[in-house]
Amino acid sequence: MSNRSAETRARIQQRALELFARDGYAATRVVDIAAAAGVSHMTFFRHFPTKEDVVLDDPFDPFIADLIAAQPRDLPVLERVRLGLLTSATELPEWAVAQTRERIRLAACEPALRARLSEQLRTTERCIVARLIEQATDPLTASTATAACLAALRVALLDWGEHGDETLNDRIRAALGVLGPAEAPCEPSTNAE
């Protein structure tokens, strides 16, 4: 994607979020977004196939998959995915964090968007699983570990979007912390009772 195309895409998304905040998601039409962004409605559709995509589409799946793939391979797969997601939460650009808050808040409040958020996370899941399989992780393990971590991430995103009383990173850390590294199992007692 060229710099000009990326700038146009970012401008469309920013104007859409501003209109959604001012007028409401349902009341905002694609033609309104295009006009506010200074583009035609056809240009809007070249960048975003639907109005929902302007809220939910993000370019970070390959970035997240790369961070997960970079985790030490001697760690359990669940821990690699968990640590990669934690790292991604702290390495997103500042503009992305601010915009993500608005997008997630909107998705948390709009039933149609909430359902589409799950679809978007399935796209993220496929990207991560494919990358793990490239690294010789068996498909069942890759899918299970990724699904568990993304379920925790979804809970964190929606909770943060609805309540927003902590930073996004704090909510993500808390949710993924539930899946944190398990402590070593206790040794069985050798004392008979």
Image (cartoon, grey):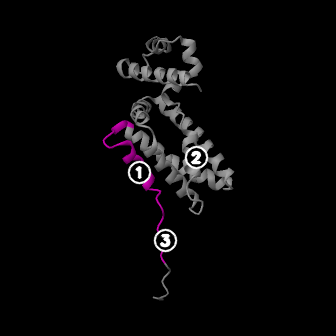
- The image position of residue 94, as x and y in percent, is 40, 36
Relative placement, left or right, of 144 versus 87 is right
The crowding category of the residue bearing disc 2, from other C-alpha atoms within 10 Å (few below 14, some 14 to 19, many at least 20), is some
Q: Residue at x 56, y 35 (%)?
A: 119
Viewer-proximal residue among 67 and 180: 67
Relative placement, left or right, of 173 versus 146 is left
Tag 1 and tag 3, C-beta contact below 8 Å:
no
Measured in 3D between alpha carbons, the distance from the residue under mark 1 to the one under mark 3, in whole angstroms, is 21 Å
The residue indicated by pointer 1 is 173
Residue segment shown in magenta: 161-186
* Among numbered discs 1 and 3, the one appearing first in the sequence: 1
Amino acid marked by disc 1: Arg
* Among numbered discs 1 and 2, the one appearing first in the sequence: 2
- The image position of residue 114, as x and y in percent, is 48, 33
Measured in 3D between alpha carbons, the distance from the residue under mark 1 to the one under mark 2, in whole angstroms, is 19 Å
* Among numbered discs 2 and 3, the one appearing first in the sequence: 2
Tag 2 and tag 3, C-beta contact below 8 Å:
no
Mark 1 or 2, which is nearer the eye? 2
Mark 2 or 3, which is nearer the eye? 2
Q: Residue at x 50, y 48 (%)?
A: 85
Asked if 135 appears above or below 52 in the picture, the reply is below
Tell me the SS state at disc 3. Answer: loop
Amino acid marked by disc 2: Asp
The residue indicated by pointer 3 is 184
Report the disc number at residue 78.
Answer: none
